[in-house]
Image: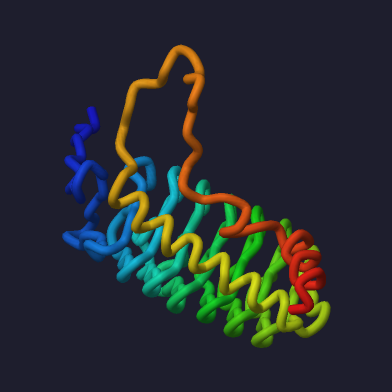
Amino acid sequence: MTEVLAVAPCTHGSMATYEIDGVRPVISPSAFVHAQASLVGDVIVEDGCYVGPFASLRGDFGRITIGGGSNVQDGCVVHSFPGADCVLHPESHIGHGVVLHGCTVGSLAMVGMNSVVMDGVMIGEHALIAANSFVPAEFEVPARTLVAGNPAKVIRELDETTLAWKARGVRVYQDLAQRSLASLKPCQPLTAVEADRARVSTGSDVSQPLSTYRRQEAGSGG
């Protein structure tokens, strides 16, 4: 009979992380990693990052580096082949449900929701991968371009409005990391809505969809 061994997690606050081959994740004290995220082995999360619930960062084959001020949102998967690294340079912006496998993401690049980025891909600084894109292995995404499709293709260079909107989104998640460190905690739900129910501290003035942001900028003459 095969003996089954229980694996005891190491902890970072209330969050469970896991070592493998004696290698433990590293998380900066100024980063926020949700308690329902999973970090295994050779994972490095630098200053001011946000890692959302149900994100899986598996450094059991290669190193994963999440550069300072980056965000990896809900349900993302980050992994690589043995001996290969997956690197997010500072202020990378990774949307909900993205899969990154053995790729490199440049600073202030944004990978849109539910995209898949394969091994050896190099995403240039300030680039934008549109939602639901499939970026095939070894593809090089030029800096400051929009890439979209399955398989992904370069569509055009990004205008200044889009670049400003992307940068704003990165700052919103940097702020969310600090808000979460300061105030996010488990609680019991209420059974009825309060008459004077408060809202969270972020409103539409903080961040909007790109289409809304464009209209606002056009209306303001920006």
Snapshot colouring: rainbow
Residue drawn at 60 percent across, 84 percent down: 124
> To which quarter of the image does residue 86 belong?
bottom left
Q: Position of residue 93 (x, y in %)?
A: 54, 67
Q: Is residue 116 above or below residue 179?
A: below
> To which quarter of the image does residue 43 belong?
bottom left
Q: Nearer the viewer, residue 81 or 95?
A: 95
Q: Nearer the viewer, residue 30 or 168?
A: 168
- Is the N terminus in the top left, top right, bottom left or bottom right quadrant? top left
Q: Is residue 66 above or below residue 76?
A: below
Q: Is residue 150 above or below residue 218?
A: above
Q: Nearer the viewer, residue 127 or 64?
A: 127
| Residue 103 as seen in the image, left or right of residue 162 | left
| Residue 61 as seen in the image, left or right of residue 166 | left
Q: How many marks?
A: 0
Residue drawn at 31 percent across, 54 percent down: 40
Q: Position of residue 105 (x, y in %)?
A: 53, 76
Residue at the top extreme? 191
- Is the C terminus in the top left, top right, bottom left or bottom right quadrant? bottom right
Residue drawn at 35 percent across, 49 percent down: 180
Residue drawn at 34 percent across, 21 percent down: 188
Q: Position of residue 81 (x, y in %)?
A: 46, 66
Q: Position of residue 77 (x, y in %)?
A: 50, 54
Q: Is residue 92 above or below residue 212?
A: below
| Residue 143 as seen in the image, left or right of residue 32 | right
| Residue 135 as seen in the image, left or right of residue 184 | right
